[in-house]
Image: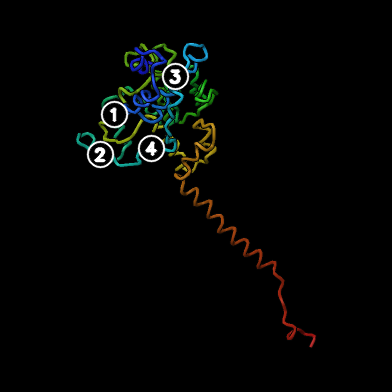
Amino acid sequence: MAFVISQFGNRTADTITPQEIDRWLESHWDWAKATKNRYLALLKLTYRLGNQNEKVKNNPARLVRMQRENNARIRYLNQHEPLPATLDYLKRHTDEESRLRAVIETKYAFHMPEFEIALNTGMRLSEQYNTEWPNVNLAQRLLTVSRSKHGEKRHIPLNSTAVAAFERLALQANGSTFVFLNMERDAPLRANKHWFENSVVEAGIRDLTWHDLRHTFASRLAMAGVDLRTIQELMGHKTIQMTCRYSHLSPSHQLAAVEKLVSHGSRLKRSKRHSTPELTDPRTDGSN
């Protein structure tokens, strides 16, 4: 809302036009389509509530169309090669993940557990940074998200790497109920742009966001042959359609599926061969 107020806060609601709203959104060329849609949705809601409470008669935001979002985009670590390294300590790291790890370990080691947990649980950013210790059961290797994106509780299994990261964080807990704290350990962390985006830039990685660590989690499961239904459960997707974006990353699984047709065809041929009765030539039959 702060961005909306900074742009329109000195105007009365009835004087704002759809064209002004559209131009404002388009002026932010660095915003993703999804970000623009969220601000437009906020404006639409504000006007709708104002209309319901008889504070305003018109809703100019209603006439501005939402932009079509590309929800099919998948970007995961090691999908591309990083840019040529200019810093000596990065030159021996030739893939995206090892390059990124080198930067984090060198400059932001305090935040390495955050990176490991994101990569090994596939949690959404809000789920991860709102995690509290009562919801982490290291004995059962299970993390509970009290309220997911869809408003439901979900349970996330923790592999050994994730458990080790949580154990490291537990040593830094300082009595706080929140899992992720700032470096002074006196306040909870709510985001990671201040270190993650800097790490991505220094590592020479293009077009990678924190959310892409979630894509990496799902992509690696698919490439390891994990079935889509299990990936759906681990990702907390509401529908299987969201998970199907990763199906093309499992070529060996797909090849095994179509290869079954070969064995099926062989069985069918054998079955026909054994079930066809032998025909005898009446000229050679012993009745002559």
The CA span between labels 3 and 2 is 34 Å
The residue type indicated by label 1 comes to Ser
Looking at the image, can residue 163 be seen? no
> Looking at the image, is mark 1 or mark 3 earlier in the sequence?
3
- Give residue 86's position: percent from left, percent from top: 19, 36
The residue type indicated by label 3 comes to Asn
Local secondary structure at mark 2: loop
Q: Quadrant of the N terminus?
A: top left
Looking at the image, can residue 77 be seen? yes
Residue labelled with disc 3: 130
The residue carrying pointer 2 sits among few (fewer than 14), some (14 to 19) or many (20 or more) residues within 10 Å by Cα, namely some
Residue labelled with disc 4: 76
- Give residue 74's position: percent from left, percent from top: 41, 38
Residue 83, numbered circle: 2
- Give residue 178's position: percent from left, percent from top: 43, 15
The reply to whether the C-beta atoms of the residues labelled 1 and 2 are less than 8 Å apart is: no
The CA span between labels 1 and 3 is 23 Å
The CA span between labels 4 and 2 is 16 Å
Residue shown at the point (50%, 48%) measured from the top left:
253
Q: Is residue 58 left or right of residue 8?
A: right
The CA span between labels 4 and 1 is 16 Å
Residue labelled with disc 1: 199
The residue type indicated by label 2 comes to Leu
Residue shown at the point (37%, 21%) measured from the top left:
191
Local secondary structure at mark 3: loop
- Give residue 116's position: percent from left, percent from top: 38, 29
Residue shown at the point (47%, 28%) measured from the top left:
158
